[in-house]
Image: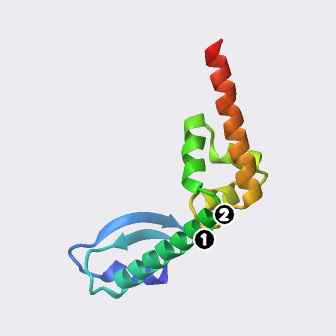
Amino acid sequence: MLINLKCDTCKEPSKYVTGFYDGKKGEHGVLYDCKNELCEVNQLMRAAEAEDIQKRLEIQDMDSQRGISAGYVAAKRRDAGLTMYQMSRIGGCSPAEYSSYEHERKPFDPEVYRKCINYLKEIRNTERKEKLF
């Protein structure tokens, strides 16, 4: 929250609240953002966002080279009405780890991906059979 301390006293007219935080020992406060492109804090935030986007693109590229699509799994999971928690159990990993795969913060583990895709295909086939009868 040290970066945000500069924002507390800033008189920038484009400053707006983006969130709140609660810390240890009753510490709490507000998170700000602004439209001022000359602001050091704003520049740091935008640089960090650009870095995150670049890393995500690299992870997407690595996954696609292995024939893995996190977006496809996410869409099929939502269509099937499953939560990330349920998919993490199906894939045999923690919910936090599964979330990292689906949000492309980590390259998808091929074994977890295989288990999830197979389960989603199984569900789809079961639903089709039920509709026929």
> What residue is drawn where x is 36% and y is 72%?
32
Depth check: give the residue in front, 5 or 90. 90
Between discs 2 and 1, the one toward the N terminus: 1
Query: In the displayed structure, would residue 24 be above or below residue 92?
Result: below
Which three-letter amino acid code belongs to the residue tagged 1?
A: Lys
The disc at residue 41 is none
Q: Judging from the image, what secondary structure is the residue with disc 1 in?
A: helix
Which residue is at a point 63% across and 39% down the rendered structure image? 82
Based on the displayed image, in which of its 4 quarters is residue 103 positioned?
A: bottom right
In the drawing, what numbered circle is on residue 24?
1
**Residue visible at 66% across and 63% down in the picture:** 66
Report the residue at 38% width, 65% height from top. Answer: 18
Q: Position of residue 30 (x, y in %)?
A: 41, 69
According to the image, label 2 marks what residue?
A: 66
> The disc labelled 2 sits on which kind of residue?
Arg
- In percent of width and height, residue 15 lies at 27, 73
Reply above or below: 5 against 61.
below
Q: Is residue 130 visible?
A: yes
Q: Residue furthest top?
A: 133
Say above or below: 5 vs 64. below
Q: Relative to 95, is 8 on the left or the right?
A: left
Please state the horizontal and vertical placement of residue 89, each as a whole percent of the image.
76, 47
State the separation of the CA atoms marked 2 and 1. Answer: 43 Å
Count of numbered badges drawn on the protein: 2
- Where residue 109 appears, as percent x and y from the top left, is 72, 61
Mark 2: secondary structure: loop
For this rendering, which residue is in front, 91 or 124? Answer: 124
